[in-house]
Amino acid sequence: MALGRAPQQDWYRVLGIEPGAKAAEVKAAHRRLAREWHPDTNATPEAHARMSAINRAREVLLDPVARSEFDRNRRVEAPMAARPAPAPARPGREIHIRARQPKANPTVTPAPPRQDKVQPPGPRGRYTAAPDFERDWYAFLGVSARAPGEEIRAALGRKAMAMQGTSISATEVARRNAELRAAQATIGDPSVRAAYDRARGPGRGKG
C-alpha cells in the first residue's frame, strides 16, 4: 500500500542522501540521524518534529511505489522550484518635469552720462545743486540782475550748449556743469532768486 506523500518535504534532503541512493544507504542514514534526533537522547524542542520527518523519509524511500510516486512528483516540482521568483513589478517611472526658472537678468549698471554732452535746463529743466549766494551769477550768465526768468533760462541754455563739441577735459566739463547747476539753483528759482537779490543788497546791477 502506497504511503501518502508530503510534497512540502524532500525526503532525500531530510536524510542527507542523493536521489539515487540504495535502500542500504537509506537505512544507514536513518540510523545515524535517529541517534542524533531521537527525543530520548535529544531534549531540544525541535527533536520530536525532526524525528518524525526522518521516520517518514525512511518509510517513503524504502517503499518502491511511494518512492516512485515521490520521484515523479519531485521531478515535476523541481523545475518550478528552480524558477526564479518573479521580480516585483517595477513601478512606472515617474517623470519629473522641472519648471524652467526664468533666468535672472544680470543687474546692468547704467553707463554714466558722458561728461562732454550737457543738456540745457530749458523751461522745465533744473540743475540739482545747492544755491550759492557768494558768486555773482548774473555776471556769470551775462544778464542783468533785472532779467526775467525766461532770459535767465535762455542764458543757462546758451552756456550749456557752448560746451558742446569743445575739446576740454572731463574735469573741466564737470567744473562747468557744477557752475551751471549752482546758477540754476540760485537765480533760476524765483523764490531763491529773491532771497539772493536781498542778500546781495540794493544797487547791484549786472555783474
Image: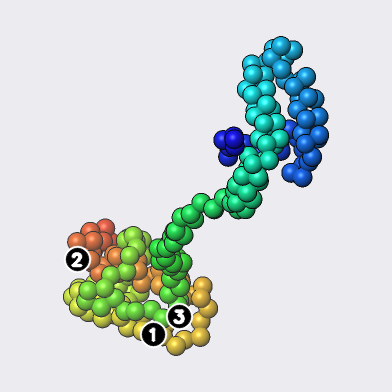
Q: Which mark is residue 116?
A: 3
Give the number of the mark in front: 2 or 3.
Answer: 3
The percent coordinates of residue 163 (x first, y second) are 41, 83
In the image, taking residue 22 as reference, residue 168 lies left or right, namely left
Q: Quadrant of the N terminus?
A: top right
Q: Residues within 10 Å of mark 3 (few under 14, many from 20)?
A: some
> Is 134 above or below relative to 159?
above
Where does label 1 land, which residue? 162
In the image, taking residue 115 as reference, residue 206 lies left or right, namely left
The percent coordinates of residue 132 (x first, y second) are 34, 61
Q: Quadrant of the C terminus?
A: bottom left
Identity of the residue drawn at 22% across and 74% down: 124
Spot the residue most to the bottom.
165
Query: Which of 187 and 170 lies nearest the eye of the viewer?
Result: 170
> Is 97 above or below relative to 147?
above
Amino acid beneath label 2: Pro
Spatial CA distance of label 3 from label 1 is 11 Å
| Mark 3 or mark 1: whose residue is earlier in sequence | 3
Where does label 2 land, which residue? 190
The percent coordinates of residue 133 (x first, y second) are 32, 60
> Is 64 above or below relative to 160?
above
Dot 1 falls on a residue whose secondary structure is helix
Q: Residues within 10 Å of mark 2 (few under 14, many from 20)?
A: few
Identity of the residue drawn at 77% across and 45% down: 20
